[in-house]
Amino acid sequence: MAEFRGCELPEDLYYDLDYVWVRPEENGLFVIGLTDPAQTMAGKVQYVWIKEPGTWRAHKKPLARIESGKWAGGIPAPFPGTIIARNDVVLANPNLINIDPYHDAWLVQFRPDNPESALKELWTGSSAQKALEAWITRYDVQCMRCQD
């Protein structure tokens, strides 16, 4: 796993370069969560609201809302599709996003309207790493993780 200024940046994920990471699953669904740099910028997450399963979301429309002591905002859909499942563990323990953003703290399982083109606007691999490093530098982020 790549790391830059304390931020974990898994090479096998896809990124929108603002807030979210996306992981394709073998069953055709996509798991979506908040990136390490984004959780750091938000601060300690105190509240998470996630749309109900079965809800269709257009590209860039919020899948979830995150609130911390210093930031509140929507987490955008990286492509159009339907929420299949939401992470009830994160709903009960929002701070998990600050502890484990890439594993236990995923937000939704999402079925894209068009699986073949869903990832076309997202970044992955070395190009994602370089773009994320530029984002981290531009916003002067030094990633930190909260403890349990």
Image: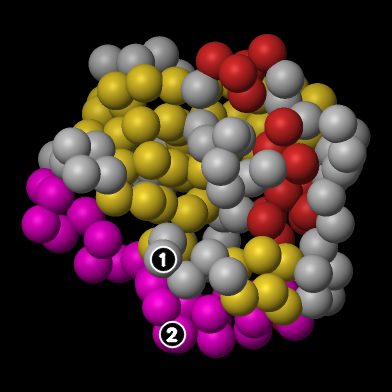
- The relative height of residue 126 versus residue 88 in the rendered view (above or below) is below
According to the image, what is the colour scheme of the structure?
A: secondary structure
- Which residue occupies 72% across, 67% down? 7
Work out how far the residue at label 1 is from the one at label 2, CA to CA, in angstroms.
12 Å
Q: Is residue 30 visible?
A: yes
Q: Secondary structure at mark 1?
A: loop
Figure check: 147 above or below 36? above
**Residue 89 x %, y %:** 60, 18
Question: The disc labelled 2 sits on which kind of residue?
Answer: Ser
Mark 2: secondary structure: helix
Which region is colored magenta?
Answer: 114-137
Q: For residue 131: magenta?
A: yes
* Residue 52, image quadrant: top left
The image's mark for residue 12 is: 1
* Residue 84 in the image, given as x and y percentages of width and height: 29, 23
- Judge by depth and name the residue closer to the eye, 52 or 98: 98
| Residue 73: x %, y % from top left | 65, 38
Q: Residue at x 29, y 50 (%)?
A: 24
63 in the magenta segment: no
Residue at the spot x=68%, y=43% of the render? 100
Q: Position of residue 145 (x, y in %)?
A: 83, 50
**Which residue in the structure is indicated by mark 2?**
127
Callout 1: 10 Å neighbours few (<14), some, many (20+)? some
Q: Is residue 52 left or right of residue 71?
A: left
